[in-house]
Amino acid sequence: MSQPRTEPDMPRPWPAARRQAAQMRLCLLFYLGLGAPGVRRTYPEWRVRAAAGRAPDLVRDLVALYRGEGDAGTGTVETINFRCAAVTPADGGEKFFVKEFPRGHAWHDVERALRCSRVDRAWRAAHLLPRLGILTPRAVGAAVTRARDGAPIEFLATEWLERAIPYHLRLRGVGEGSEARRGLLQGFADQMRGWHDRGIYLRDLVKNVLTRESDGGLEYWLTDLDQIHPGRRVTRSRVLHQMRQLARRCGPLAAEEARAIVGHYVGTTRGRTAEAIEDALLTAEPAAPA
């Protein structure tokens, strides 16, 4: 069978068998929980897990601050969005990211009993993804306590990423039709391809990517790792979903921008898959600016 034709500056198409093998390896490592150590400690009404080098007391204090249970002099809390905040304890002054995971329905109890709750998934992913060469803020700790109504509620704390800008906001900051914008779109397509080739799929991908300037160029960091389900195959329909999401968040896209994304993700601008992705990019309705 002849190989799809590729343009000189585009990556070669990734064989489906290699992508599936990578996903099976990721799935095995993820669900076995390998390489995700933690120091566990139980307090009255608290169960805490701290990452290596972090104290369980720090994790408990961060969550207490987030919940408004600390005095004003013990630190500050800056709300980021729904159930997320930047927390800075007074001692040390290091800033952390804290996210809340309330019990939504009975299935969450089953997941927690099987050690596969949203916090468990995020915890494992935060330890595993760097081993695969994927950037993500390092985990600090996780905690389980009770909400005011008595339902269990979980929290995850990670390190704060300084000077980071959400990808879609960075893209909106450059001029339409500029080379800088096209380069950002190509860079995101390369990153998306790399994540998918390693079996990483987040349903709400675009809004959960942070970018940061470094000496080596622009870095792409994955966040909201509780969405990761390694057993969820990166199918064509899921790729199209993420491409429409990219267009809604970052569009409208010009035809040459859509072709640049297709070429850097697929490795060619020809074929049914490439045409379907280009159509998804050009026909998705842009969302209102956030």
Image (cartoon, rainbow, N blue to C red):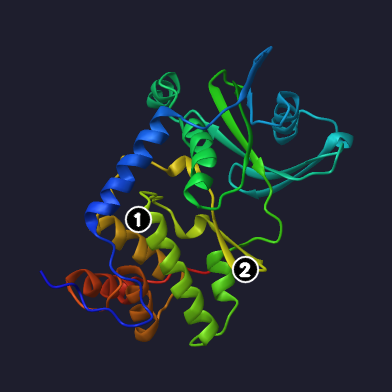
Q: CB of mark 1 within 8 Å of CB of mark 2?
A: no
Q: Residues within 10 Å of mark 1 (few under 14, many from 20)?
A: many
Give the residue at the far top of this rendering: 44
Residue sitting at 69 percent across and 48 percent down?
Answer: 160
Quarter holding the C terminus is: bottom right
Can residue 287 be seen in this snapshot? Answer: no
**Residue linked to disc 1:** 197
Report helix, strand or loop for mark 1.
helix
From the viewer's perspective, is 20 left or right of 104?
A: left
Report helix, strand or loop for mark 2.
loop
Q: Position of residue 92 (x, y in %)?
A: 85, 40
The label on residue 216 is 2
Q: Position of residue 234 (x, y in %)?
A: 29, 52
Q: Residues within 10 Å of mark 2 (few under 14, many from 20)?
A: few
Q: Nearer the viewer, residue 248 or 196?
A: 196
Location of residue 270 by image quarter:
bottom left
Q: Amino acid at mark 1?
A: Asp
From the viewer's perspective, is 133 left or right of 6?
A: right
